[in-house]
Image: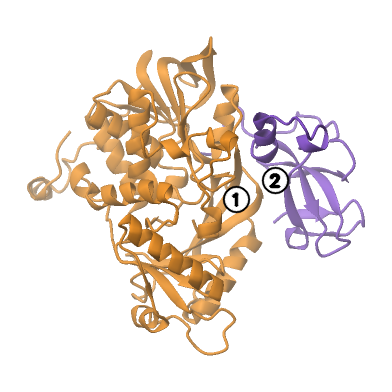
């Protein structure tokens, strides 16, 4: 079970008190140039995901607390949270040294 | 490789079963193959089998980082059905279902296919209507599938709770009499044996670490057992698809999440059909050993760890306890998770890619097991002829660019 702390109201709780909002920092092309969006840009926005095995930047909402959205950095292999940061912030620079998924040997099938 | 029959059984019985040989070779990689398939799960092995059998391409390697059938093929709830709403889906799942029906004979390996009947419960008025629509669509497509009344449900499933005042009353069910289950491991083993018999090399404990692309064309894969050259490479790695496509510089419309299942302690036979309850997110069947096999919806968040979260499990079990009060005192024996690859429209991707000679078969999400024979059949054809098989064509990766979806997420809800 994931343990999460909300950077807005400071409440800590398990994942049932929050709700996942998917990958973060995906730019909506329509808000930049609504007239000329290519099919590719629209596809990338809607469907293409980095889906990393390792460090993942994502959105959560403090559903049972303050109700505010925020960002989190989490390792999708160890399920460990690396950082919580505000919804308006850019992703923090994190040391990639931490095990970001198995490289070569060690990964389970 | 010996054929299994009543005579070989008798002969080996006389010899205290010491004479059985290996079912497939443990191959070491050669320097070059015509086709390399990455991933020795059901889909990869079926692809190799049909490449050899239908297209006479036997210079094929199936490389697997762990052991054969150890991923989602060994982690699912073994349900087989084809009652899908969209014609494109119905076509491929129906092909798979048909192949499953004759698979034990074809492979000379008992996959324990058990067409025991499958029910999708309708527990809201909306679900009743959408399932009725589904039944009509199935009938138009030629799939045997019909609506049955609550009374008929109770007759087939005596343990179901039909009392007044339940939160989600059973209003009827979509019934597919020929749906059922099969032994998941046996499907992988049967295909492995069949492929191996025809000369395919199955290379286990061999992880792909790179895919070599030159001038827009794939020419080799780097593995922990060295470089293997091939002009055609197929990625069939379910939840790990993105990790492989990243190596070839492709970007995929896929997210990996955990899907969990659990089994109870074995009890006497209480349930002889497969039941899916989409409104409450749970499905249940009883194995031959007597264990109740239970599955639910996926966990919410991206995950590669093959560990699920407890709340998701709790959600599934809570829902099923109301519909089947008899299971409330059962102890659960085992729980596990597999990493499934979800696409935006919840339909698979069987496709050529922007890299010539590189093919992908992924995105099966929560519905991979039931489609193994059909998926392998059309994917082998796609690889052999370097153009999509007619049944695979609607599932090409271009559909995300063109907005031409095969939208089953609306039709099937969660249990897919």
Q: Residue furthest right?
A: A9
User: At numbered mark 2, what does the secondary structure look like: helix, strand or loop?
Assistant: loop
Judged left or right of residue A22, residue B297 is left
Tell me if I can see residue B26 in this picture: yes
**Chain of residue at mark 1:** B
Judging from the image, what secondary structure is the residue with disc 1 in? loop
Q: Quadrant of residue A80?
A: top right
Question: Which quadrant is the N terminus of chain B positioned in?
Answer: top left
When the figure is inspected, residue B102 is found, relative to residue B271, above or below; the finding is above
- Subunit that carries the residue with mark 2: A
Return the x and y of residue B256 as percentages of the image width and height. 60, 43
* Front one among A9 and B56: B56
Which chain did the renderer colour purple? Answer: A
Above or below, comparing residue B410 to residue B168 in the picture:
above
Q: Do residues under tags 2 and 1 come within 8 Å of each other at their CB atoms?
A: yes
Q: Residue at x 36, y 48 (%)?
A: B91
Q: Nearer the viewer, residue B165 or A96?
A: B165
Number of other residues with Cα within 10 Å of mark 1, as a class: few under 14, some 14 to 19, many 20 or more: many
Identity of the residue furthest to the bottom in this view: B164
* Residue A81 pos. (x, y %): 77, 45
Question: Quick one: which residue is furthest to the front in this view?
Answer: A35
Mark 2 and mark 1 on one chain: no
Let me know if residue B124 appears in the view.
no
Q: Nearer the viewer, residue B170 or B114?
A: B170
Residue B414 % position (x, y): 55, 59
x then y, percent, for residue A16: 73, 62
**Residue named by callout 1:** B307
Residue beneath disc 2: A79
State the orange chain: B
Instruction: Say above or below: B29 vs B174.
Output: above
- Determine which quarter of the picture holds residue B148: bottom left
Could you tell whether B169 is left or right of B89 in the image? right
């Amino acid at each position: 079970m994931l343990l999460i702390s909300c950077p807005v109201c400071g409440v800590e709780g398990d994942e049932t008190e929050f709700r996942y909002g998917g990958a973060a920092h995906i730019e909506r092309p329509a808000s930049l140039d609504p007239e000329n969006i290519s099919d590719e840009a629209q596809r990338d926005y809607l469907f293409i995901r980095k889906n990393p095995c390792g460090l993942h930047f994502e959105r959560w909402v403090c559903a049972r607390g303050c109700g505010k959205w925020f960002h989190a950095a989490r390792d999708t292999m160890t399920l460990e949270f690396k950082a919580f940061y505000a919804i308006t912030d850019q992703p923090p620079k994190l040391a990639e040294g931490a095990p970001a998924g198995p490289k070569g040997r060690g990964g389970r099938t | 490789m010996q054929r299994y029959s009543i005579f070989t059984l008798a002969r080996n019985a006389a010899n205290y079963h010491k004479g059985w040989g290996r079912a497939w070779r443990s191959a070491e990689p050669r320097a070059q193959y015509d086709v390399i398939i990455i991933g020795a799960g059901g889909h990869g092995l079926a692809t190799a089998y049909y490449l050899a059998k239908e297209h006479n391409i036997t210079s094929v390697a199936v490389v697997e980082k762990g052991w054969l059938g150890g991923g989602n093929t060994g982690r699912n709830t073994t349900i087989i059905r084809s009652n899908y709403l969209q014609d494109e889906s119905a076509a491929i799942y129906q092909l798979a279902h048909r192949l499953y029906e004759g698979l034990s004979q074809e492979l000379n390996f008992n996959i324990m296919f058990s067409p025991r009947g499958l029910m999708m419960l309708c527990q809201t008025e909306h679900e009743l209507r959408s399932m009725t629509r589904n039944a009509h669509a199935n009938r138009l497509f030629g799939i045997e599938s019909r609506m049955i009344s609550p009374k008929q449900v109770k007759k087939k499933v005596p343990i179901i709770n039909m009392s007044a005042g339940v939160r989600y009353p059973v209003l009827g069910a979509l019934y597919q009499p020929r749906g059922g289950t099969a032994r998941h491991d046996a499907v992988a083993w049967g295909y492995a044996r069949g492929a191996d018999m025809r000369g395919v090399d199955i290379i286990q404990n061999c992880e792909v670490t790179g895919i070599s692309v030159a001038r827009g064309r794939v020419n080799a894969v780097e593995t922990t057992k060295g470089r293997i050259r091939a002009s055609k490479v197929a990625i069939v790695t379910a939840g790990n698809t993105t990790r492989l496509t990243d190596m070839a510089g492709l970007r995929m419309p896929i997210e990996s999440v955990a899907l969990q299942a659990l089994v109870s302690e074995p009890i006497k036979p209480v349930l002889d059909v497969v039941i899916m309850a989409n409104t409450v997110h749970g499905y249940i069947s009883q194995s031959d050993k007597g264990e109740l096999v239970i599955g639910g919806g996926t966990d919410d968040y991206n995950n590669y760890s093959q560990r699920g979260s407890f709340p998701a499990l709790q959600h599934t079990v809570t829902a099923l306890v109301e519909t089947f009060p008899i299971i409330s005192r059962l102890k659960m024996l085992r729980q596990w998770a597999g990493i499934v690859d979800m696409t935006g429209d919840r339909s698979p991707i069987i496709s050529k890619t922007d890299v010539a000679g590189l093919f992908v078969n992924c995105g099966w999400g929560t519905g991979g097991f039931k489609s193994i024979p059909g998926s392998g059949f059309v994917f082998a054809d796609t690889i052999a002829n370097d153009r999509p098989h007619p049944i695979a064509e609607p599932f090409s990766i271009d559909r995300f660019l063109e907005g031409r979806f095969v939208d089953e997420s609306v039709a099937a809800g969660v249990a897919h």
